Image: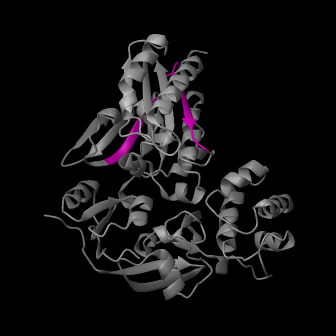
Amino acid sequence: MLHAEKTEWFELEVTVNGQKIKQAIPMHLRLLDFLRETLRLTGAKEVCGEGECGACTILLNGKAVNSCLIFAAESHGGTILTIEGLQTASGLNDVQQSFIDDHAVQCGYCIPGMILSVEEFLKHSPHPDREKIRHALAGNICRCTGYQKVVDAVENTAKKR
Amino acid sequence: MWSSIDTIHKPTSLTEAWELSQTPGTTVICGGTYLAAERDPAITGLIPLNAHLSHRITRGKSTLSIGAGVDVDNLVSFNWPSPFQPLAEAARQSCPSANIRNQRSIGGELGASRFNSELIILLHALNPQLKIVQAQESTEYLVEWNGDGIIREMALEIAPEIRMEYLRFAPIPSAAPFLCVAGVTAGAGCRIVVGGNVNSLRVLEFDTNTLGVEQQGLVLEHAEDTLLADHFGGVAYKRKLLVTALRRLGKALCT
């Protein structure tokens, strides 16, 4: 006798950018679709949909993950931070500001994912060298910048912190 | 969207998860990066394991116990005892994206068992014990495990005299290796594994802790038929590369 519940809809409870959300969602809904289509938080972008590019990066329970590879139901009970929740009361956060100051943004499509990956990385590596920064951003692909300015921005954020 | 999924089960234990997994069209998920990228339309039900797995690495007197839920990035950042430090680099190289490493669990990696994963190849050389959940729990060595059941834990024996090395050949550092050879010496024995773009991992064990000319020849003899031709080179090229790799590995393990 199996006791596991089998449901086609899932009662999701999750905290997104500090706000508690309770919502019935279909089982096959990816976290990326939940954020973009249900909550209209369009900062996380869909590009490859296979976890290769990192444009859909969000922080789930403090860890950078690709939201295109996670079912929304898997985030049940968790805490999500998207780029929309990173801004502080006084304005952009320091990573965001450094990306602007160091001209690290061109088309901007990959930038929300980059910034959230950097946000997590700097929490556990506060004084990284350039090689470590490059390793940390290996999962975030940019086709515009050539990464040089991005690495500059991360380095300068770390120096200022 | 993985539209064939209509059910996400909520098992109350690993044993129940295993029972559920015997139903056609269902699969266990623990991280899910491989499954979600493939979106196999034949799968209609998922059985998440995360809630029932340990996400910790525990160091005992003579073993390191790694819960199957430990993510691959934890393996990179873990403060390994000195002989085990190549594991951190192998974990990083096997998955260059930190985001994906955060999502992949060691249990899922072992389950997927990619032949071109530096981590999997090195782990086969170490041959840890796995705690496997089926109708009953059992303990099996990785090399002997047939892939059935759910991995609950992996235990690595800490031996002070253990040595391990691996060599990888890839066009760029972030690419998967088309040839990877790992070796571990411990006590009076040695285990060599050949992986990469191959049709199966080849594991050879010797009753000596050196990888000399005789052992290198035996590895070559038993592993050459597993090498596959690809756009990086034919089988003859891979064979020559394997000869070089074994020579270098022999030196690295003996110095």
Decide if residue A87 is on the left or right side of residue B29. Answer: right
Residue appearing at x 59%, y 64% in the figure: A64
The quarter of the displayed image where residue A7 is located: bottom left
Q: Position of residue A145 (x, y in %)?
A: 76, 67
Q: Position of residue A37 (x, y in %)?
A: 50, 87
Q: Main secondary structure of the magenta part?
A: strand
Residue appearing at x 64%, y 63% in the figure: A140
- Residue B157 among those drawn in magenta: yes
Q: Position of residue B50 (x, y in %)?
A: 39, 59
Image quadrant in which the N terminus of chain B is located: bottom left
Decide if residue A133 is on the left or right side of residue B149. Answer: right
Image quadrant in which the C terminus of chain B is located: top right
Residue appearing at x 56%, y 32% in the figure: B167
Q: Which is more toward the observer, B25 or B133?
A: B25
Q: Is residue B76 visible?
A: yes
Question: How many numbered discs, if any?
Answer: 0
Question: Looking at the picture, does residue B84 appear above or below residue A123?
Answer: above
Query: Which stretch is magenta?
Result: B151-171
User: What colour-coding does the image apply?
Assistant: one colour
Question: Looking at the picture, does residue A48 appear above or below residue B221?
Answer: below
Q: Is residue A128 visible?
A: no
Decide if residue A102 is on the left or right side of residue B218. Answer: right
Q: Which is more toward the observer, B65 or A151?
A: A151
Q: Which is more toward the observer, A110 or A95?
A: A110
The quarter of the displayed image where residue A136 is located: bottom right
- Residue B35 among those drawn in magenta: no
Q: Position of residue B178 (x, y in %)?
A: 50, 41
